[in-house]
Amino acid sequence: MGSSTKYIFITGGVTSSLGKGIIAASLGRLLLARGFSVTIQKFDPYLNIDPGTLNPYEHGECYVTDDGAETDLDLGHYERFLNVTTSQSNNITTGRIYNNVITKERKGEFLGKTVQVIPHITDEIKTNFYKLGEEGKYDVVITEIGGCVGDIESLPFIEAVRQARWDLGPSNFLVIHLTLIPYLSAAKELKTKPTQHSVKQLLEAGIQPDILVCRTEHHLPADVKKKLALFCNVQLNNVIEAMDAESIYDVPLLMKKEKLDERVMTKLKLTSKSNTDLENWKDFLGKLKNPTQEVTIGLIGKYVSLPDSYKSIIESFTHAGAAVECKVHLKLISSEEIHMDNFESKLNELDGILVAPGFGERGFEGKIETVRYARENKIPFFGICLGMQVAVIEFARNVLHLETANSTEMDPKTVHPVIGLMENQKKIVQMGGTMRLGSYACDLKKGSKAAHAYGRTKIQERHRHRYEFNNEYLKQVEDAGLIATGKNPDTGLVEIMELKNHPWFVGVQFHPEYKSTALNPQPLFVKFIQAAIDNKKK
């Protein structure tokens, strides 16, 4: 272990979805502002090797890193708050841990020993706790333990955290426990008992939390804080109130007000390397909260009943909207509900239309109708991944009159496969981790909308797909006005399509939303919102 690296563990109690990821990201942001190098990792207690094969309804979107890891959506929060990239090493699941241990056992690495949860599984967990710290790049490694204290699934992780205190020593180790203080409206009081129980469970597992972060809808009065400190064995000034915030981007400043960073630094014996510079963060928040104009944009997809399925896209609109001081009202519309008879009424009040990524044919024809509407009515259009492929299919059907044009994903026998399976995907039988994943280069055509947005002609963007534009149709499509303005320099794969004689019609094969951060909004989203503003004025 890098002895100079400090390790912070964040656990959760009472209920899931309390926002451990946001607290981790906010603390990371505050420590960055004090001049420390910080990274955050997430340990997920489920048995999937990664979330790549999970339905978005199960777990929200699957986030992809530069190195092609399919990860938990919390890694998106880490990147958006910290402005630093994460990797395969930042998200570990129980499945990965067991897979590693069983692989070692099959190789004979345990020399005849009985392989057990303790020490073999917990040792593998700890190895992964420390991996990022050993690179020597980070002063602080924050580790979020997924799930809830007391879950059967997370027991080995909690035990590994207990052992980590012994490995690291008290001034290099800190546990923050995030918990809920419910308000009973009938009794008109805040209740500390769930938190007491949750801390008791942690204590039974051998862990004394150093700091309690209390999620609450009401301010915590002094007597409630005192009670929590007394019964949970925590210093009074280490009981931190985390009120529900108007925006997740408020949380770093709220945590600063509660002195979370100071409490952490005191315990870990850290002294600031620089003055707390949150000026650029405050600028971003200022623009976010004081927009000078507003637009309504339709997000057309098939998982709209769970907005977390499109987490990165929704956040990208927040970042880009703030950049142009525009409030973006996102209208999530299910593509399954759009058809020939109602598309006009569903789409006519939108200033811009985004067709979202996805898989499979459910809701596919609704997306086709949506693109046709945007193309014919000159509404700013942005298609991402499947959204770009839909734009190509719609164009082939309605402009080139190839009525049966399709993707071989939707119709393997189509006569006009304008979208087809990538060559290196054809022999793949396993589903997990086998798509075209991670960051790839793209060369942009000079003078294109994409080149104008990025301000350069060479870019790198992240991917997650199996199907691609079929270059056999490129000449036909381009002659009719749909131009490939972005291509992969090595394979000739079409990455960006733009429609001539349209105010703003751009489809991209990659996922631009994965690289948008609060302080570095994604340029295509910025230009798309600008186009929607212009369209609204018109």
Image (tube, rainbow, N blue to C red):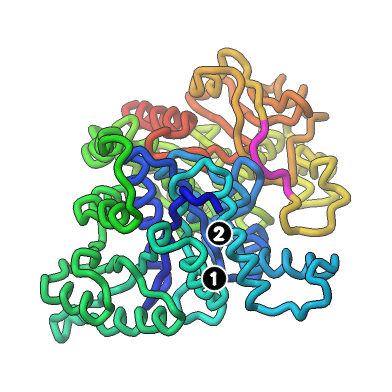
Say the numbered circle drawn on residue 129. 2
For the residues marked 2 and 1, what is the alpha-carbon distance in whole angstroms?
9 Å
Q: Is residue 519 visible?
A: yes
Residue 99 position by quadrant: bottom right
Residue 476: x and y, percent?
76, 24
Q: Residue furthest right?
A: 427
In this image, 94 relative to 136: left or right?
A: right
Residue 243: x and y, percent?
23, 62
Of pointers 2 and 1, the one earlier in the residue sequence: 2
Residue 348: x and y, percent?
42, 43
Q: On the image, numbered disc 1 is attached to which residue?
A: 160
Q: Amino acid at mark 2?
A: Phe
Say what secondary structure mark 2 lies in.
Answer: helix
Give the camera-side residue of 271 and 337: 271
**Residue numbers of the magenta segment:** 435-440
Say the numbered circle drawn on residue 322. none
Question: What residue appears at the point 75 percent right and 51 percent down from the top-left corner?
Answer: 434
In this image, 273 relative to 402: left or right?
A: left
Residue 447: x and y, percent?
56, 13
> Overall secondary structure of the magenta stretch?
strand
Give the camera-side residue of 370 and 316: 316
Residue 511 position by quadrant: top right
Q: Is residue 344 visible?
A: no
Question: What residue appears at the point 77 percent right and 26 percent down from the top-left corner?
Answer: 490
Mark 2 vs 1: CB contact within 8 A: yes
Question: What residue appears at the point 54 percent right and 82 percent down from the top-left corner?
Answer: 152
Vertical placement of 113 versus 322: above or below? below
Q: Amino acid at mark 1?
A: Ala
Indicate yes or no whether the magenta region holds residue 457: no
Say what secondary structure mark 1 lies in.
Answer: helix
